[in-house]
């Protein structure tokens, strides 16, 4: 599955202030890792955001967010955000920083 290269580029810009960002092909798209932990990614035109179990309810209450369920079973602590929720740079920035904050709260791998 191809992923939205423009969205990936915009994520790279949003993560520009973080040290040690690593990109890895994952979930049929691309994932962005901080300290070895996934924070965000792109599958198709959707943004994947790792919010953790504690942040899941709030994330799902946001417009354009839905459970990440590419296998038919939702992944715990992850959401998809559709393109309507990432079209504006400030909206994308908020989602990316949410995922980055969670990844940075975890022990480095």
Image: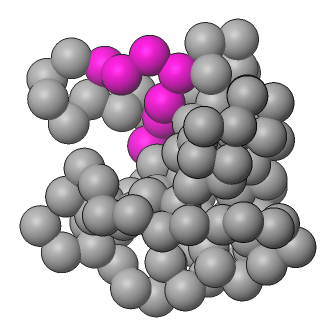
Q: Nearer the viewer, residue 36 or 17?
A: 36
106 falls in the magenta region: no
- Left or right of 11, for residue 89: right
Q: Residue at x 79, y 40 (%)?
A: 104
User: Where does residue 62 sit, x and y in percent of width and height?
Assistant: 66, 35
* Viewport quadrant of the C terminus: top right
Instruction: Please determine whether, in this image, residue 71 is positioned above or below residue 40.
Output: above
The furthest residue to the front: 109
User: Where does residue 103 sit, x and y in percent of width and height?
Assistant: 70, 39
Residue 108: image quadrant is top right
Looking at the picture, the colour scheme in use is: one colour
Q: Nearer the viewer, residue 47 or 108?
A: 108
* Viewport quadrant of the N terminus: bottom left
User: Where does residue 93 sit, x and y in percent of width and height?
Assistant: 77, 65
Q: Which residues are magenta?
A: 74-80
The furthest residue to the right: 17
- Left or right of 73, for residue 12: right
Q: Residue at x 73, y 28 (%)?
A: 106
Question: Is residue 95 in view from this perspective?
Answer: no
Q: Residue at x 57, y 55 (%)?
A: 33
User: Where does residue 49 sit, x and y in percent of width and height?
Assistant: 55, 44
- Left or right of 73, for residue 35: right
78 falls in the magenta region: yes
Instruction: Please determine whether, in this image, residue 40 is positioned above or below residue 102.
Output: below
Q: Nearer the viewer, residue 105 or 86?
A: 105
Question: Is residue 8 in view from this perspective?
Answer: yes
Instruction: Please determine whether, in this image, residue 52 is positioned above or below residue 12.
Output: above
Label count reads 0
């Amino acid at each position: 599955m191809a992923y939205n290269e423009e969205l990936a580029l915009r994520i790279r810009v949003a993560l520009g202030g973080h040290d040690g960002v690593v990109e890895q092909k994952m979930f049929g798209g691309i994932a962005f890792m901080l300290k070895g932990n996934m924070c965000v990614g792109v599958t198709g035109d959707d943004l994947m955001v790792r919010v953790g179990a504690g942040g899941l309810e709030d994330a799902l209450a946001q417009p354009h967010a839905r459970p990440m369920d590419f296998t038919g079973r939702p992944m715990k602590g992850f959401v998809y955000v559709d393109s309507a929720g990432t079209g504006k740079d400030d909206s994308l920035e908020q989602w990316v920083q949410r995922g980055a904050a969670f990844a940075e709260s975890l022990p480095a791998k």
